[in-house]
């Protein structure tokens, strides 16, 4: 009996590795919470675990390959009775094919099925070798759980909308995360209040496209638009910073900027992915806006009373992107003056409309464009970060770099501002302090704490 108990104890441990975006990071917090509430214990290594889970990303081919490499590295442990599960976007995208590719995997579940995790765990425990959770795009349910195991005690995510209905021609997300479904604003606010009561001061509202948030509240009086929800979360007592990601230019309304004006706790940063500076390419990408319409939204932000920091995502080497198109994207960088750019080489994804498009750009050319773009942005950012020198900015303390004798901080604009403090000063992680900026680098700032 004790031996058997020990055996079942062993299978009740799990290891989870997460790949990909913030949505995945937050899903993992919910998955961990759910597993713990089902009696599992999280362990830090594959070796110690009975159940090995990968929460995967399939946005680009490279990300997808990573999980198969991992599975290959660790399949030797199957003999010891370890079970393997693939969660997230690769699971949803490839479905049962994963069992063929990696026969030692016994759980495949996409994010739209996580609410059924407890039942799936029971099946796994019963020895089922082919457990699946592959709800398709049709689900109306969100994954709401009271068991979220947040990893940071000061700053946390809240999902407000899941899925995406935009179908940009290069993107797997509408297939892997299902159709758009929003949570009620009351449930979002309840979670925000609960987090504030636990001592959280920063909240990041998450969704694939937060601007298409639609409050499903039946009661008309309590119904909130996205901008109203932003303002309401930022007014929860104890919450000092609210961020949101990701925005889609087509749905990005002026009311968001008005909310940023009116509510100081809303951070002065907007991530607004443009993907390309060429209207021709935007059209082929099915982005539903032109360069001019995008720039109109940028103009709203530039006219705001608070200076709003703008960051973006760009794809280079989309099929048929000419040198002239690419030059338009470079020109846009200069025109907007981004504070950060996440740039990617186009990666053809199975089942997406652009997969079969002609005029593929050779990989070397994609690499060249990516490098030119990053170099251009680096030079622009180096100049634009300079404007902060001499400014006094409040940071949230994130930690300490002993080797450099510096504290690490983050500004409301989401910039890294490292700083020194007088000897003997000890700062708590998650506290807020004023810092005067002394030096600017292309990706971070350096300063001195004001005492
Ligand atoms: N290839 C390259 N980049 C992509 N992204 C989305 N799909 C692809 C793809 N097929 C990028 C977009 C998006 C970001 C999260 O990833 O820029 O905004
Ligand atoms: Fe993908 Fe476009 Fe939806 Fe973003 S808006 S998740 S890029 S389909």
Image: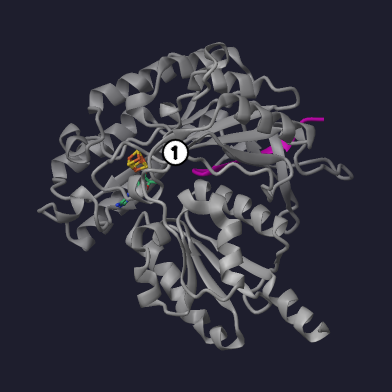
Closer to the camera in the image, 112 or 160: 112
Residue 17 among magenta residues: no
Q: Reply above or below: 223 against 189.
A: above
Q: Is residue 65 left or right of residue 223?
A: left
Q: Is residue 64 left or right of residue 364?
A: right
The percent position of residue 192, horizontal first and vertical second, equals 67, 31
Q: Is residue 408 left or right of residue 426?
A: left
The percent position of residue 144, horizontal first and vertical second, equals 59, 41
Q: Quadrant of the N terminus?
A: bottom right
Work out whether residue 6 can be spotted: yes
Graded by Cα atoms within 10 Å as few (under 14), some (14 to 19) or many (20 or more), the crowding at tag 1 reads few
Work out whether residue 433 can be spotted: no
The percent position of residue 22, horizontal first and vertical second, equals 52, 47
The percent position of residue 355, horizontal first and vertical second, equals 19, 55
Q: Reply above or below: 261 against 180.
A: above
Task: Give SS at disc 1.
Answer: loop
Magenta range: 441-451
Residue 443 among magenta residues: yes
Q: Reply above or below: 341 against 13.
A: above
Closer to the camera in the image, 3 or 79: 3
Q: Quadrant of the C terminus?
A: top right
Q: Is mark 1 within 8 Å of ligand 2?
A: no
**Residue identified by numbered label 1:** 140
Closer to the camera in the image, 438 or 211: 211
Displayed quadrant of residue 31: bottom right
Q: Reply above or below: 80 against 358.
A: below
């Amino acid at each position: 009996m004790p031996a058997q108990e020990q055996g079942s104890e062993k299978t009740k441990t799990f290891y989870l590795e997460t790949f990909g975006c913030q949505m995945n990071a937050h899903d993992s917090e919910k998955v961990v919470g759910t597993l713990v509430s089902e009696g599992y214990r999280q362990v830090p290594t594959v070796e110690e675990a009975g159940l090995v889970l990968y929460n995967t990303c399939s946005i680009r081919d490279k990300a997808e390959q990573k999980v198969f490499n991992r599975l290959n590295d660790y399949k030797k442990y199957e003999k010891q009775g370890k079970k393997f599960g693939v969660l997230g976007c690769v699971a949803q995208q490839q479905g049962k094919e994963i069992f063929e590719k990696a026969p030692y995997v016994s759980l495949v579940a996409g994010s739209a099925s996580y609410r059924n995790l407890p039942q799936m765990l029971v099946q796994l425990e019963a020895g089922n070798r082919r457990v699946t959770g592959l709800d398709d795009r049709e689900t109306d349910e969100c994954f709401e759980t009271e068991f979220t195991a947040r990893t940071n005690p000061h700053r946390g995510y809240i999902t407000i909308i899941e899925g995406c209905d935009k179908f940009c021609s290069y993107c797997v997300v509408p297939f892997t995360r299902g159709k758009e479904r929003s949570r009620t604003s009351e449930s979002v606010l309840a979670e925000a209040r609960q987090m504030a009561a636990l001592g959280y001061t920063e909240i990041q509202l998450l969704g694939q496209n937060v601007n298409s948030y639609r409050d499903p509240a039946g009661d008309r009086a309590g119904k909130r638009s996205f901008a109203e929800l932003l303002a309401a979360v930022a007014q929860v007592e104890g919450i000092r910073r609210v961020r949101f990601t990701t925005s889609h230019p087509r749905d990005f309304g002026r009311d968001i900027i008005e909310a940023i004006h009116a509510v100081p706790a809303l951070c002065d940063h907007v991530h607004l992915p443009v993907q390309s500076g060429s209207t021709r390419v935007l059209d082929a990408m099915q982005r539903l806006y032109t360069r001019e319409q995008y720039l109109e939204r940028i103009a709203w932000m530039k006219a705001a009373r608070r200076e709003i920091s703008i960051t973006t995502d760009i794809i280079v080497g989309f099929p048929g992107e000419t040198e002239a198109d690419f030059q338009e994207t470079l020109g846009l960088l200069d025109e907007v003056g981004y504070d950060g750019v996440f740039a990617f080489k186009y990666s053809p994804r199975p089942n997406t409309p652009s997969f079969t498009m002609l005029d593929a750009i050779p990989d070397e050319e994609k690499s060249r464009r990516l490098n030119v773009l990053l170099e251009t942005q680096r030079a622009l950012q180096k100049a634009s970060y300079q404007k902060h020198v001499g400014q006094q900015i409040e940071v949230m303390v994130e930690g300490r770099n002993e080797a450099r004798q510096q504290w690490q901080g983050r500004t409301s604009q989401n910039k890294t501002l490292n700083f020194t403090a007088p000897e003997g000063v000890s700062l708590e992680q998650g506290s807020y302090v004023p810092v005067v900026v002394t030096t600017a680098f292309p990706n971070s700032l350096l300063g001195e704490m004001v005492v």
